[in-house]
Image (cartoon, rainbow, N blue to C red):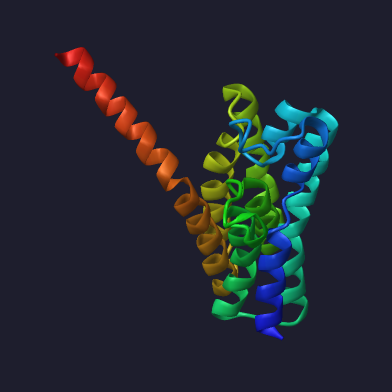
């Protein structure tokens, strides 16, 4: 049953409504248009309604496997795998040649299901930071570590803390190529200015 929850979570995560909505509106995928297949990208490419629907779908696909695993009494690494599976599916979709999005909304859904009260509180701070900076990923930059600190301070169960950290690691791993390219761009710009 545990393996079924993890496999089902991965397949559910691999469904990318962003690709469907953007293709329906434009005839192209978000990647073909130079954008990310997530709610913010869909908002820009297909409109706010489709962006909101994409965000809801992506959050829910993070919530479902964790909720099912909790209901079945799954703990330990299987619980962490159940939380990571939809995020991995979203980031590296089997249906789209292992391409995907950044996993922010799906990770948010998994984290909210892992520890509702702590993550919901942290999300308020993340949403405010995102609105102030006008940069959607700021939600995760602020909310994820804040929620983790709240979980630890409030004595969350160990398997839930491990699952939350695991989800955050998956999100960071997905961002590594982008982060490295940004750091290299900054380094080359600095080097050029110094010459």
Q: Quadrant of the N terminus?
A: bottom right
Quarter of the image where the C terminus is located: top left
Question: Residue at the front extreme?
Answer: 27
Quadrant for residue 135, please give it.
Answer: top right
Residue 188 lies, in percent from the top left, at: 26, 25
In the picture as drawn, the residue positioned furthest to the bottom comes out as 1
Residue pictured at 66% horizontal, 67% vertical: 10
Q: Position of residue 112 (x, y in %)?
A: 70, 56
Q: Is 140 placed above or below 96 here?
A: above
> In the visual, does 70 lie left or right of 125?
right
Instruction: Please identify the residue farthest to the right as the structure is shown.
Output: 49
Q: Nearer the viewer, residue 33 or 150?
A: 33
How far across and how far down the image is residue 37, in percent? Answer: 66, 41
Residue 43, relative to residue 96: is it above or below?
A: above
Total numbered labels? 0
Please name the residue shown 62% across and 37% down the image. Answer: 125
Nearer to me, 127 or 95: 95
In this picture, is 182 found above or below 81?
Answer: above
Q: Quadrant of residue 41?
A: top right
The percent coordinates of residue 28 (x first, y second) are 71, 35
Q: Nearer the viewer, residue 146 or 40?
A: 40
Task: Report the residue at 63% width, 30% height from top.
Answer: 33
């Amino acid at each position: 049953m545990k393996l079924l929850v993890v496999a089902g979570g991965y397949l559910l995560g691999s469904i990318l409504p962003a690709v469907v909505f953007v293709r329906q509106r434009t005839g192209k995928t978000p990647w073909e248009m130079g954008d990310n297949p997530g709610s913010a990208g869909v908002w820009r490419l297909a409109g706010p309604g489709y962006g909101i629907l994409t965000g809801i779908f992506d959050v829910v696909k993070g919530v479902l496997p964790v909720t099912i695993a909790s209901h079945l009494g799954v703990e330990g690494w299987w619980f962490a795998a159940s939380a990571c599976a939809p995020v991995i599916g979203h980031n590296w979709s089997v249906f789209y040649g292992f391409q995907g999005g950044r996993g922010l909304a799906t990770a948010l859904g998994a984290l909210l299901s892992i520890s509702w009260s702590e993550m919901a509180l942290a999300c308020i701070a993340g949403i405010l930071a995102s609105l102030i900076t006008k940069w959607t990923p700021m939600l995760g930059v602020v909310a994820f570590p804040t929620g983790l600190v709240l979980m630890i301070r409030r004595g969350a169960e160990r398997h839930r803390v491990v699952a939350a950290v695991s989800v955050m690691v998956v999100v960071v791993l997905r961002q590594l190529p982008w982060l490295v390219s940004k750091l290299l761009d900054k380094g080359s710009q600095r080097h050029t200015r110094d010459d």
